[in-house]
Each structure stands twice: as structure tokens, then as C-alpha cells.
Amino acid sequence: MMGDYCIRITDEMRELADTAGRARFGNKEPYQEMLYGDHPSVDTNIFGALGEIIVASALGLEFDAEARKHGDDGWDMAIVPNLTIDVKARRHKMTYSTYDLALDESDPFDMKADIYVLVIIDGDIAHLYGWTSKVAMMFHGQRIYYRDWRWAMPSGKLRHFDELVAQSIALRQRAKEK
């Protein structure tokens, strides 16, 4: 896989994801409680929380387990204030192009995060497959149809995750020096 930046998923990560995912699911407005394919929304919330935990761990950031009634405002964590990340976790085997970073937004101007990360979870291994910026997504992404229209970045255009790790460390160091 691209970059092959992998993390072994621990039992503690799974337990935290289960707790956070269930709390998030239980705290949402009724209209948000829908099914995503064959996976009930509670499973989707747990899986998404696991992806966030993995990325936060890899970048040395805090995982935000708070359950908000209206979701996460389109981003999951911040490297530094005003530099946000949205994590998209995918299962290893899916029916559509797993290796495209697909967003829920159909219009790139609706994107809320500054950075988008693709995590592919295969059993106990998480592959931090790649990332892209909001600007790159706007100019190089494409519209795809999967249940509805979405904006996506083909896997070949994603940047290596280790670049994001290095940039995250440098940005946090500069923020401490100020």
C-alpha cells in the first residue's frame, strides 16, 4: 500500500472507539440515525472513532471523544488551532473503490477541514494510506457516485502519511516556540 505507514490496533483503541462511537450515536438527532449500507449507524460511528484514534495516535494528538448533538462540524482534530483534520476510515474490503478518499460533501466548496486522511483498517492493522489538503482536493478531486454524489481524491494523488507526521511535528514545535 502507498507509503505503508501502519499501526497495530490495540484492545485499548478498540474499547475507546466502542465507548466513543456508542456515545456519539446515542447523542445524535433522530434524522442522523440512518443506515450506511449493511452497517448500522452505531457501527459506523464506532469505526469512524477508531480511525480518528489511530490518526491521533500516529500524529501525537489528543483524541476528542466528546459526543456532540450535531456532529463534529466537518473535522475531527486539529494539529494546531485553525489547521483541522477530517479522518475517513474504510474497511479493507468494500464494494466501491476503497483506495479513493471519498468525502460526504458533493461540492468541494462545502468541505470544512483543511486536511483529509484516509485510513484503511484490515483486521488488527491500520494502514494510514495517505492524505490531501482541502485545496488539492478542490483542484484535483473528482465527483463520484456511491449512493449519492461525493467528492473524492483518487488514491494515486494522495500524499504519503509520513509527510503529514513530519509537518505536524514541525508545526506543533513552532506553536510552542511562540
Image: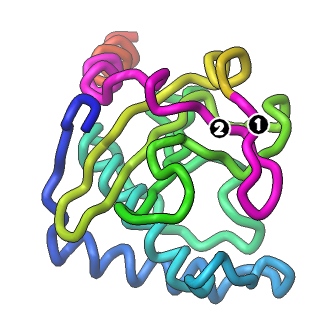
**Residue 106 magenta:** no
Residue in the picture at 60% in, 87% down: 40
Q: Are marks 2 and 1 in contact (CB under 8 Å)?
A: yes
Amino acid type, callout 2: Ala
Q: Is residue 14 above or below residue 87?
A: below
Which quarter of the rendered picture does the N terminus lie within?
Answer: top left
Residue in the picture at 18% in, 46% down: 6
**Residue 161 magenta:** yes
Amino acid type, callout 1: Arg
Image coordinates for residue 125, horizontal then vertical, percent: 18, 60
The Cα–Cα distance between marks 2 and 1, rounded to whole angstroms, is 6 Å
Q: Nearer the viewer, residue 46 or 149?
A: 149
First in sequence: mark 2 vs mark 1 = 1
Image coordinates for residue 74, horizontal then vertical, percent: 69, 48
Q: Nearer the viewer, residue 172 or 84?
A: 84
Q: Nearer the viewer, residue 171 or 136?
A: 136
Image coordinates for residue 66, horizontal then vertical, percent: 54, 68
Q: Is residue 176 above or below residue 63?
A: above
Which label number is shown at residue 143?
Answer: 1
Q: Which residues are magenta?
A: 142-167
* Colour theme: rainbow
Q: Is residue 119 above or below residue 32?
A: above
Report the residue marked by disc 2: 152
How crowded pointer 2 is (Cα within 10 Å; few <14, some 14-19, many 20+) is rated as many
Image coordinates for residue 104, horizontal then vertical, percent: 72, 52
Q: Is residue 57 above or below residue 43?
A: above
Image side of residue 113 versus residue 8, left or right: right
Image side of residue 66 versus residue 111, left or right: left
SS state under label 2: strand
Residue in the picture at 19% in, 36% down: 4
